[in-house]
Amino acid sequence: MSEYGIFCLLIWRALAQLMLRERAALLLAGVLALLYAVSDEFHQKFVPGRTGEPRDVAIDSAGIIIAILFVVFVKRWRAARSAPAAGEAQSRRNTG
């Protein structure tokens, strides 16, 4: 689960450098990581001693969702944290 979460974050960071919209990059990273999880489970059906289970895709998906929520939370936290500072700087310029 954690591996797919980290994988999603790495894809997002790469896509964020190429795309203008971070939200689109994050969504595409989640979709690409999910597609890879599905293809990995499909591949495991053909490996002796391994089985491809839909349950494993669900577990990998949970890691992807947690990673996406983490990015959204950190972005909102940073925006909320910088908003009061920006407002204070603006009021200083207006009064000073």
Image (cartoon, grey):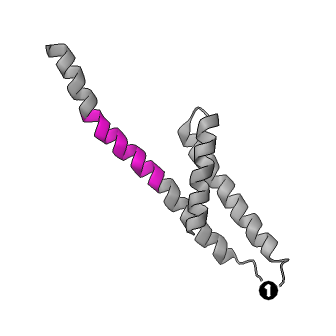
- Vertical order, 31 against 59 (above or below): above
Q: Is residue 74 left or right of residue 16?
A: left
In the depicted structure, whether residue 22 falls above or below residue 90: below
Horizontal and vertical percent position of residue 54: 69, 75
User: Which residue sits at x=81%, y=71%?
Assistant: 43
Image x and y of residue 5, in percent: 56, 61
Q: Residue at x 63, y 43 (%)?
A: 14
Residue 22, magenta (yes or no): no
* Secondary structure mainly formed by the magenta segment: helix
Q: Quadrant of residue 89?
A: top left
Q: Nearer the viewer, residue 52 or 82?
A: 82
Residue beneath the point at 60% across and 51% down? 10
| Image quadrant occupied by the N terminus | bottom right
**Image check: 50 left or right of 61?**
right
Quadrant the C terminus occupies: top left
- Under circle 1, the secondary element is loop
Count the marks: how many? 1
Q: Position of residue 20 (x, y in %)?
A: 59, 32
> Is 24 displayed left or right of 77 in the figure?
right
Mark 1 is on which residue type? Gly
Q: Residues within 10 Å of mark 1 (few under 14, many from 20)?
A: few
Residue 96 drawn above or below residue 61: above
At which x and y percent is residue 67? 51, 57
Does 72 appear in magenta?
yes
Specify start and end residues of the magenta stretch as a single range: 70-84
Q: Residue at x 53, y 60 (%)?
A: 65
> Mark 1 highlights which residue?
49
Q: Classify 48 as above or below 63.
A: below
Q: Residue furthest left?
A: 95
